[in-house]
Amino acid sequence: MTPLVLIGAGWGGWQWWERKSNAQSSYLTALVQRGDIEDVVTATGLLQPRDYVDVGAQVSGQLNKILVEVGSEVQAGQLLAEIGAEQSAARVTANRASLRAQRATLAQRQVELAKAERDLRRQKNLLADEATTAEAVQNAETTVLSTRAQIQSLEAQIEQADASMQVEEANLKYAKIYAPMAGTVVSISARQGQTLNANQSAPTILRIADLSVMTVQAQVSEADVSRLRVGMPVYFTTLGSGGQRWQSTLKKVEPTPTVTNNVVLYNALFDVPNPQRRLMSQMTAQVFFVVAQAKGVLTVPMAGLTIQRGAQGPRAGAGSANGGAAGPAAGAAASSPGAQVAQGASGGVGGAGGAGGAGGGQGPRPDWQSLSPEERERLRAERRANGNAGGPPSGAWGGSGAGAGAGAGSGGAMPARRAVAKVLTAEGVQEREVQVGVSSRVVAEILSGLQEGERVVTGQRQAGAPSAAAAGGGNNRAGAAPSGMPPPGGMR
């Protein structure tokens, strides 16, 4: 071969490689790699104590003393304030004097009753000896009855006066205000020397709150409230917390919304322990309700996926196009822990065998979003144990390759979400169907169809834009966020 031919062949090969390299460098790509994903509902909330009480005055008068300050720790039964009680004390003294006078009058009437009863007996004895008249006996009986009625009236008056005196004594006690619960004084709304009027409404003097447990009241839009469920994980951050997360679980969602500027918002409440008192009242919280999450899974940016809307997977109990015949016995014999998880999530089992199939079919699987975190983790562990990190778990999905497999799942279970990814290979860009699990607005979990280390196309590079290598990387990390933005899958 002449040198000229060798030079021409080398030039042609170099031109071919250069054109292929330029074609590949015109794409924006991201690396398929492992990471954590969180599908969250975000909301803004306010912090407030879970348990608090407004301490008010039950009697009118001048507020003479306030014995605590804002921030003071108080115990139940501790004296907090004193109100001038001169009028209440005078009324108690007057009621006691009136009560003593009524009791003295009652004693006098009881003496008169005893005399009237003796006169009545004497008149009856005289009448038996015909020494008096019937009229005199009747007058004596009338005197006895009248005296008894007066005594009953005095007894009722004494009971009424005694009840009034108890009220005045209670008001005298109310002049000293005690703490109804243990906690922290968070606000004082009255001032020493202020005159309080309790006749119209009970005036509030101060508020005591238990700051050891705080309640977050988050306002969730009507578009997202249907995704919440009681008991789901939730965390929040506060301004100035340095990214620290406070973890909790959703306690309840109030059914009555609040409408602000024609925006319908529902209050979602949950409690969080506050042993160090770092959380305070009226703090603003950025709340994240975790709808689904996955840790240590294959991830790619959502920009590299095209979700297939309305794509239906095969039903349970039927093999794939390249798989073998379906059979309940085959499905039951080859069922695996992953299949049992799928059965528990969907409510039934249907075997799908792929015996001797050249390309092995892909059976159905339950809706990934409907599985609990424990069920998802079991499916992922099975997939890793079978050495098929990029593929579906055996048993739950069906066989792959020339071996036999079995699928478990309900015939009515929702199919897995399907998507199409453009994979950059040595031969060029290939479209590949993938299965998507948990996804956020930024990244998605890949259940099958991609392998760790592959590159997916996320966009077309504009003319004149620097290449990835020139930009100082050439390794667009899957799910990487722009500068200044939190990483995907929630704040870290």
Image: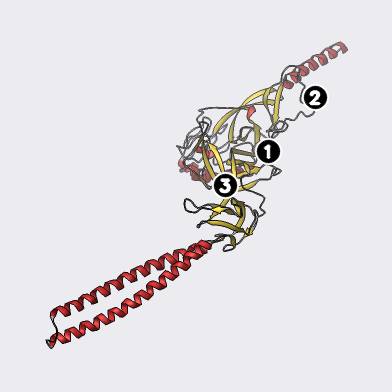
- Residue under the point 58% across and 29% down: 419
Q: Amino acid at mark 1?
A: Arg
Tag nearer the camera, 1 or 2: 2
Residue pushed farthest left?
130
Q: Amino acid at mark 3?
A: Glu
Q: Quadrant of residue 368?
A: top right
Q: CA distance from mark 3 to mark 2?
A: 44 Å
Identify the image quadrant of the N terminus. Answer: top right
Residue 123 in view of the camera: yes
From the viewer's perspective, is residue 350 above or below residue 215?
Answer: above
Q: Quadrant of residue 376?
A: top right
* Position of residue 26 in the picture relative to residue 95 (left or right): right
* Position of residue 273 in the picture relative to residue 24 (left or right): left
* Position of residue 415 in the picture relative to residue 128 (left or right): right
Figure coloring: secondary structure
Counting residues from the N terminus, which is met first, the one under dot 3 or under dot 1?
1
Q: CA distance from mark 3 to mark 1?
A: 19 Å
Q: Give the structural element (helix, strand or loop) at label 2.
A: loop
- Residue under the point 56% across and 56% down: 62
Give me the disc on residue 34: 1
Report the front residue among 9 and 225.
Answer: 225
Q: CA distance from mark 1 to mark 2?
A: 25 Å
- Residue under the point 55% across and 32% down: 417
The residue carrying mark 3 is 374
Give me the disc on residue 470: 2
Q: Give the structural element (helix, strand or loop) at label 1.
A: strand
